[in-house]
Amino acid sequence: MNGEVTIFDIIKVVLLWLSPLIFLESLLLLMLPVDKYTELEAILGKEIGGLKKRISKKLENNISDLHAFLLENKNVVGIICILCSMVFFFALRK
C-alpha cells in the first residue's frame, strides 16, 4: 500500500486513543459509591432552559431500566471496561 489510509486504520487510532479514557472512566465507576455517582449525574443532568420533549416513552423507559441495571452491577461493568481498554491498548499499539 502506498500510504493509503483505510477506515480500519482510523478505527485503530481512535480506539488506541480512547483506551486510556475508558480505563479512567472504569476506575471512577469502580471507586465512586452509587450515591456519589447519582449526585454527579444529577448535577450533569440539569437542564439549563427550554422544554424537555419526550419523543419515545417506551425507549426512554428501556434506557432507564438499562441504566438502573448497570448501576446495580457497576463492579462487573467496571471490570469489563478495564479489560476492554487493556485489550484495545495492547492489541492496537503496534
Image (cartoon, rainbow, N blue to C red):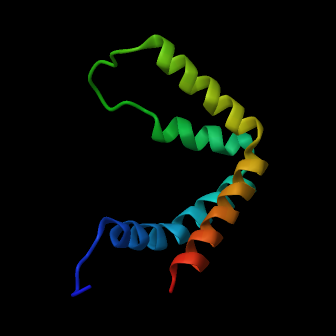
Identify the residue shown where x is 46% and y is 35%: 45
Q: x, y (%) of residue 5?
A: 26, 76
Depth check: give the residue in front, 21 or 45: 21
Residue 54, placed above or below residue 80 = above
Residue 66, placed above or below residue 85 = above
Return the residue found at the far top.
57
Please give the count of numbered marks on the rendered protein.
0
Left or right of 45, for residue 8 = left
Which quadrant would residue 8 be assigned to in this image?
Answer: bottom left
Q: Quadrant of the N terminus?
A: bottom left
Left or right of 80, for residue 10 = left
Q: x, y (%) of residue 52?
A: 34, 19
Q: x, y (%) of residue 85?
A: 60, 66
Q: x, y (%) of residue 53?
A: 33, 16
Depth check: give the residue in front, 52 or 6: 6
Residue 18, placed above or below residue 52 = below
Identify the residue shown where x is 71% and y is 49%: 77
